[in-house]
């Protein structure tokens, strides 16, 4: 039996390749009569930066500042994702009904993508990749590569278009 994709998770960072990956996700959703779930993960601040800022501001002030601005950032990013989807689907507004949810999570991108895929019972995960060079890839790794390695679900990786 051929796979039937009903829940598609597209994880996006809203960079230059987001549009291309989103279009692939929409086409896959159309062909499978599937629901789309958009996800953006706000990465955690590096521990060294947190330590420095905590020293300058004080630990209590930093915690209050982070909580207040985390909520604001999440709300703003969710609005940006909603606008992004509306703009990209302006010629096909009927596809907006395919969007079952828009989530903005805070944490490690790979872990959050995999947890969200589990939560929504995604049949496939779609990611855009930046096509970084060998040096960046070797030292920084790649969210797409790590999701590919760790996922128990199919992962569809859309390369950056030239």
Image (cartoon, helix red, strand yellow):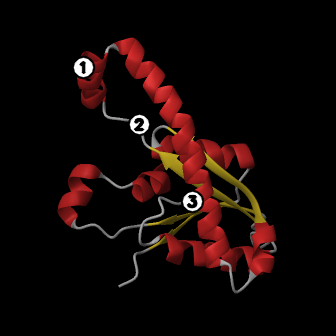
Report whether 35 appears left or right of 140. Answer: right
In whole angstroms, how far apart are the C-alphas of marks 1 and 3? 32 Å
Task: Give the residue pinned by disc 3.
Answer: 80
**Residue 56 tag number:** 1
Whether 26 is drawn above or below 134: the answer is below
Can you tell which of label 1 and label 2 is closer to the viewer? Answer: 1
SS class of the residue under badge 1? helix
The answer to which image quadrant residue 3 occupies is bottom right
Considering the image in quadrants, where does the C terminus appear? bottom left
- Residue 157, image x, y percentages: 49, 68
Please, what secondary structure does the residue beneath circle 2 have? loop
State the separation of the CA atoms marked 2 and 3.
20 Å
**Residue 19 higher or lower than 8, as above or below:** below
**Image position of 130 (left or right of 115):** left
Please name the residue shown 71% across and 43% down the image: 119
Residues under labels 1 and 2: Cα distance?
19 Å
- Nearest to N terminus: mark 1 or mark 3: 1
Q: In which quadrant of the rendered view does residue 96 lie? A: bottom right
Q: Specify whether residue 10 is in view.
A: no
Which residue is more in the foreground, 24 or 54? 54
Res. 44 mark: 2
Mark closest to the chain's N terminus, 2 or 3? 2
Q: Which residue is drawn at 21% across and 64% down?
A: 134
Q: Residues within 10 Å of mark 3 (few under 14, many from 20)?
A: few
Q: Position of residue 111 (x, y in %)?
A: 51, 41
Which residue is painted at 41% across and 57% down in the image? Answer: 145
Residue 8 in picture, x, y percent from top left: 69, 63
Tell me the quarter of the image containing the N terminus: bottom right
């Amino acid at each position: 039996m051929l796979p039937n994709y009903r829940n598609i998770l597209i994880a996006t960072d809203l960079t230059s390749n987001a549009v291309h990956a989103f279009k692939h996700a929409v086409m896959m959703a159309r062909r499978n009569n599937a629901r789309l779930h958009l996800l953006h993960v706000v990465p955690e601040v590096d521990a060294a930066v947190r330590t420095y800022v905590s020293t300058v501001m004080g630990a209590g002030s930093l915690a209050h500042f982070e909580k207040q601005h985390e909520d604001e950032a999440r709300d703003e990013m969710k609005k940006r994702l909603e606008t992004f989807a509306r703009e990209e689907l302006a010629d096909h507004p009927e596809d907006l009904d395919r969007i079952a949810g828009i989530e903005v999570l805070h944490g490690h991108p790979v872990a959050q993508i995999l947890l969200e895929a589990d939560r929504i019972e995604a049949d496939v995960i779609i990611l855009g990749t930046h096509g970084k060079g060998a040096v960046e890839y070797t030292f920084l790794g790649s969210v797409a590569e790590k999701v590919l390695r760790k996922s128990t679900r199919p992962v569809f990786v859309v390369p950056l278009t030239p």
